[in-house]
Image (cartoon, rainbow, N blue to C red):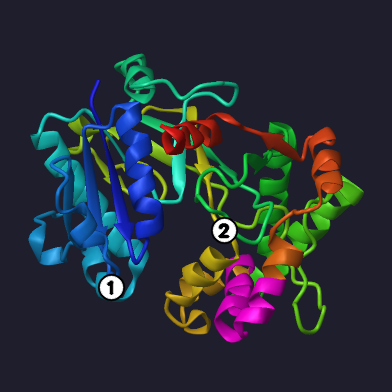
Amino acid sequence: MTFAITYTVKNEQRLVLESLIYYRHLGCSRFYVFLDHTTDDLPDLLSGYSDVLVRSSVAPAELIDHTVWFEQIQKEAEGWLDLRKKLNTYWASLHARDCGIEWIAAIDPDELIINDLHMDVIKPKSLASFLSKVPQDTGQLRMVNLDNVPVGLRASHPFSGSDLFLNRPKEPIETFWRYSRSIFRLLIRNPEQWAYYQAWYDQLFFRCLLGDAFPRLVRHPLTGKELPTGYFLSYTSGKSFVRTDLLHAIRPDVHYWFPLPGEELRTVRQGIVLHYDMIDADYFVHKFRQRPKHSDVSTVKSLYKRWVIARVAVDLPDEAAVAFFRQSIAIMNPIRQDYLLKKGVLRRIPAVKAFFESQSSS
């Protein structure tokens, strides 16, 4: 079974090169790396790899598509990264299909896919084997994401600095949280403020649920003011694999694919995405400072927790940003780590860390 991985990146050479090692081991046939205003050395570093197609982000004029999906994207793609990601994903999927590649996933370079949370070893070609067992009538695999929890200020390697991950709540609790916050959103009459109040709702919901096992209380490093972020510091919607022979009937969204009107897409939940969102203090600052001015980007501010975290990295000097990372992002105290492990808030997933440690020692 063949599969491809596609990335849209901006100055992410620290992560991309290590990710390629991982996915080659898992059996990846082709990588598509779209450079979106990249200024680092990644293009040169990737030039010698025959399994990597490197190019700039796709312009709408390069695609011929008469769907409403495309009509909506082409008008705003130049100023909206998420729309360019969709175009890149679709272009890569068409190319992969024409090359005979059967599956494709659009992920970020800080995301690593595993088949099973309980696996001890990352076996060669294990992801290709995993995909080969998916029933033929299943067109999409929705993979739940788990966020890595940094345990120090500096990580010598992006994917082996920590093997701790934030557990998802039990499914009934997460379902209740999602539905209740949707109802809460309907009660907010000012649409410009719903993201702020929803962030506070998430904060209060999980603090009441978890008590002293609430994992991280985020505070502004200068004022000490509590910042509402809830339980999750990043997205919660996961990512997906899709079959490329369905491109006549489906189109990509940011995290998943959807069927065109009148078409069907059978989706099942399988696989896990390990999200190394903020691996250390340096990457935290790098990640958010290279983005557009967040206060002017509605798509970032609508997810208030990301916007307020980004403001610390963008607005404050290095020392304050590092202090924020130490106090509010990383969980560095081993006693606290053990307590959260016992409470089921954190879990260890050692296989990926062991894989990269074995690579560095070989």
Instruction: Say above or below: 327 vs 349.
Output: below
Magenta stretch secondary structure, dominant: helix
Instruction: Say above or below: 249 vs 109.
Output: above
Residue 243 % position (x, y) = 26, 30
Residue 339 % position (x, y) = 86, 41
Residue at 70% across, 71% down: 324
Residue 109 versus residue 232: which sits nearer the camera? 109
Task: Quadrant for the N terminus, please.
Answer: top left
One can see residue 293 in this view: yes
In the rendered image, which residue does mark 2 sit on?
278
Residue 5 % position (x, y) = 29, 41
Residue at 19% across, 45% down: 52
In the rendered image, which residue does mark 1 sit on?
39
Q: Which residues are magenta?
A: 305-323
Mark pair 2, 1: CA separation: 21 Å
One can see residue 69 in this view: no
**Mark 1 residue crowding within 10 angstroms, few (<14) / some (14–19) / many (20+):** few
The amino acid beneath tag 2 is: Met
